[in-house]
Amino acid sequence: MVCCEYFHPRDEGASTFTVSMPRLTFGRGCLHEAGARAAALGMKRVALITDPTLVEGPFVHTVKSSLGAAGLDVAVFADARVEPSDTSVGEAIRFLNDGNFDGLVSVGGGSAMDTAKAAAVYQRYPATFTDYFGAPAGAGISVPGPVVPHLACPTTSGTGSECTGLSVIRIDALDTKFVLASPYIMPDEALVDPSCTDSLPERVVASSGFDLLSHAIECYTAKAYTEWAPVANPTARPNIQGANPWSDLSAREALKLVGRYLERGVADATDSDARDSLMWASTLAGMAFGNCGTHLPHAMSYGVTNLMRDITTADYPVASPFVPHGISVIVNSPSVFRYMAEGAPTRHLEAAEFLGFDVKDAGPDDAGEVVAARIIELMRATDMPNGLGGIGFKLDDVGGLADSAVRQGRAIANAPRETNRNDIATIYERAMSYW
Ligand SMILES: [Fe+2]
């Protein structure tokens, strides 16, 4: 592609990329549009998917009232779990099977939206749960076709799941999270109402902010789509297709916003400029990774979640041990980018600059250090744990972490440098502490 050196054609590389997006409405108060939007999608009997902490709160109330005012029947499933698993999604599938629904409305963070996406697939196309997951977790069978319409209403500023065809589900028998990916699970519409973040605890804003930051920077530094092999069936082109001009566009803006507003949004819940900007950045980063895919920080985060032992937080409705997703990602990120910058130095330098770092004296050899320095600066300013050691991991854990992470094959292959298990172990070792 002539616009950018990074996408120059490669022999036997892909020459095309696909952009998939839902219709999206952004702004304070837009949850009140839920009824009109759902009716316009043809819904008459709606399954509202949410979680136990939100079900009695104002956002579910607003959405439910709006759906009712539009004349729709609504039944609520309030058992979406943080870190949804095949077991918890199974409960949602049974709920859908019993209800004769013609549409889904999800209200919540990534867990509610991802539960809705996965449940819709298995309700419509019953299968062994791992069938629609890629190898090595599953059989790699494509989701066969469309599912019921889905209106997604995110209530946190991090996941971006409202605009991706991705659902992250823990497979209990395999003891880790894997990604269900299909264009058919992209929500049809999203209502992104930043007023939902006004009441979020600062620790949740911080963790979800680092999640979106890492989505954006992983997309901006992912290997180019022209380095992936062309696909035989264009309608089955994976969401994880590498960096491309579309993902650049939204990743770049998301990095600028999170670099500018993360500290303010964490420090002051009344700073609506900051919290609105983080919500928009989250959606932008979702637009990026839904059409590019993340790479090593996210792949490595699943090892962290899997082997977590002794962190808990009062701000999440789960039994300990539990590490919030954004923290499980960001504790790896500086170490990953120090390692990866050699594969795309200009991109790493640019990313540091978008995040607000002065790079005028930095050259390509400094790229990894510069981007790591800016991330660490933001981590310290928002009281994040100091690397893996800050959440209880020791060097003895590195082997197990690496064994867990290497199962995330396509995400690892989306990075700008190739890595094997030993490289990943080294990156974990260097993620133990940063200051
Ligand atoms: Fe994430």
Image (cartoon, rainbow, N blue to C red):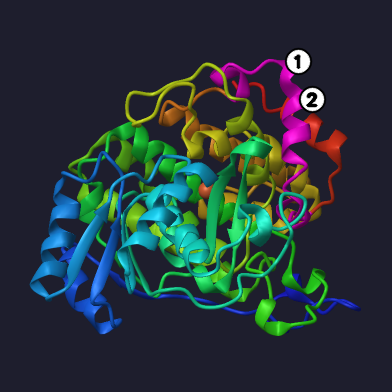
Magenta span contains residue 406: yes
Does any portion of residue 152 appear in the rendered image?
A: yes
Image location (x, y in percent) of residue 21: 47, 75
Magenta span includes 56: no
Residue extent of the magenta highlight: 387-416
Q: Which residue is mark 1?
A: 396
Expressed as whole percent of the image width and height from the top left, the position of residue 378 reads 47, 36
In the shown orientation, is residue 256 left or right of residue 417?
Answer: left
Number of other residues with Cα within 10 Å of mark 2, as a class: few under 14, some 14 to 19, many 20 or more = some
Q: Residue furthest front?
A: 98
Can residue 158 be seen in the rendering of this structure? no
Identify the image quadrant of residue 104.
bottom left
Tag 2 secondary structure: helix
Q: Are marks 2 and 1 in contact (CB under 8 Å)?
A: yes
Residue at 53% across / 66% down in the picture?
165
Is 35 drawn above or below residue 159 in the view shown? below
Residue 429 location, x and y as percent?
A: 75, 25
What residue sits right under mark 2 in the picture?
399
Type of the residue with mark 1: Asp
**Left/right of residue 256 with respect to residue 301 in the rendered view:** left
Query: What residue do we see at 72% from left, 49% from top?
Result: 137
Q: Position of residue 192 (x, y in %)?
A: 30, 63
In front: 94, or 356? 94
The quadrant of the picture occupied by the N terminus is bottom right
| Residues at marks 2 and 1, CA–CA distance in whole angstroms | 7 Å
Q: Residue furthest right?
A: 11
Q: Nearer the viewer, residue 62 or 1?
A: 62
Judge the density around disc 1: few (<14), some (14-19), many (≥20) Cα neighbours within 10 Å: few
Q: Secondary structure at mark 1?
A: helix
